[in-house]
Amino acid sequence: MMASSYNAKEEDANHPGAANHAGAGVVKSKKPDNTAFKQQRLPAWQPILTAGTVLPAFFVIGLIFIPIGIGLYVTSNNIKEFEIDYTGANIDNPCYNCAKNFSWNSTAQCVCAVTFTLEQPFESNVFMYYGLSNFYQNHRRYVKSRDDSQLNGDRSALTNPSKECEPYRRSEGSPIAPCGAIANSLFNDTLQLYHIDSNGTLNEIPLVKKGIAWWTDKHVKFRNPGGNNNLTVAFQGTSKPVNWKKPVFELDPEDPENNGFINEDFIVWMRTAALPTFRKLYRIIQKKASTTPTLPSGKYVLNVTYNYPVLSFDGRKRMILSTISWMGGKNPFLGIAYITVGSICFFLGVVLLIIHHKYDNRNNSADIPN
């Protein structure tokens, strides 16, 4: 299409408001300025979609997405994962008595043992997670119920926590450290894993508790007030959260680098989940130096110190063992999504190719003169 000539000066000359600008009482025109932007004369590019450009695009997308999706799906399926529910909601569950009798106010510990069998050995590093269901960490008031300045070691925030922490801001007149609903609901079940060998002997599986939190959280966002030397003095004058059994400076007294606000179990919990059913990393089972599997197939016992009641809100608790790959944990969704999009594009390409071939022949026949 040929561009028509346009003279902005002529248009301005014929405009009523252009004459006698200096005259008094002249009403200013509401016409937009004669610029390329306001008059919509900016240069633009618009693609012309033809069969020669659209059809190859559909086929190329399909041929690229389908193999990628298959690779992602196969990789996800190669990840080994085992999950066991130890909520104790059913009477035949070993943790039934603990679940029924335990509450936040309970002082005595309740321990239960869950036996399970691994059908396949787990190679390389194995990651142990705890999972919760029907727990809405994404609630607006719950997410805001924390004081990041306090968690970063600010002494003024330690003695005067943010009002966002209410009603878990003070206890018996003393400021709560750490304050807020997130910290108050810290997951505190203790999980121990044992392997039963052929002789029936219980062999404890070593669980690594460090390295489970994000590096930025551990070294940037969370800090103890006054360093890590004497936390008892640093947290003097504060009170523990209402639902906690012990103060924050006793989370891991044997390891100063994993105690107080920089305790990795605490840091992992403070990173809230987006969905009501979630899992959080609990421990790492490191690969053995020998050729034996990290977790050989056979019978195992999970010892649970039941400290976290969930039946009051119809929740569920589970323990997950999983390996990982270059794409992370087991999640077939991404592979399925790639395969689906690629298949749809390839199918649409075939349909449009048939339609184009059919009607293009008709048009060519109509152009032939009698």
Image: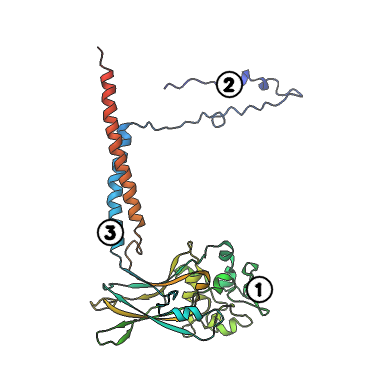
Disc 3 crowd, CA 10 A, few/some/many (<14, 14-19, 20+): few
* Amino acid identity at mark 1: Asn
Query: Is tag 2's residue or tag 1's residue first in the polypeptide sequence?
Result: 2
Q: In x, y percent, where is residue 369?
A: 26, 13
Task: Give the camera-side residue of 288 and 75.
Answer: 75
Q: Residue furthest top?
A: 370
Q: Position of residue 321 (x, y in %)?
A: 35, 72
Residue to which mark 2 is pinned? 9
The residue most toward the left is 291
Q: Quadrant of residue 247?
A: bottom right
Q: Which residue position holds label 3? A: 74
Label 3: state its secondary structure. Answer: helix
Q: Is residue 361 left or right of residue 26?
A: left
On screen, residue 187 above or below 335 = below
Badge 1: residue crowd in 10 Å (few <14, some 14–19, many ≥20): some
* Amino acid type, callout 3: Val
Between marks 1 and 3 in the image, the one whose residue lies nearer the viewer:
3
Residue 86 located left or right of residue 286: right
Relative depth, front residue between 190 and 90: 90
Residue 271, image x and y in percent? 49, 67
Residue 56 shown left or right of residue 268 in the figure = left
Q: Nearer the viewer, residue 260 or 296?
A: 296
Q: Which residue appears at 36% of the width and 55% of the height?
A: 334
Distance Cα–Cα, label 3 vs label 2: 67 Å
Q: Is residue 111 visible?
A: yes
Q: Which residue does the image show at 49% across and 71% down from the upper left?
A: 269
Q: Circle 1 is placed at which residue position?
A: 160
Measure the C-alpha gap from mark 2 to mark 1: 69 Å
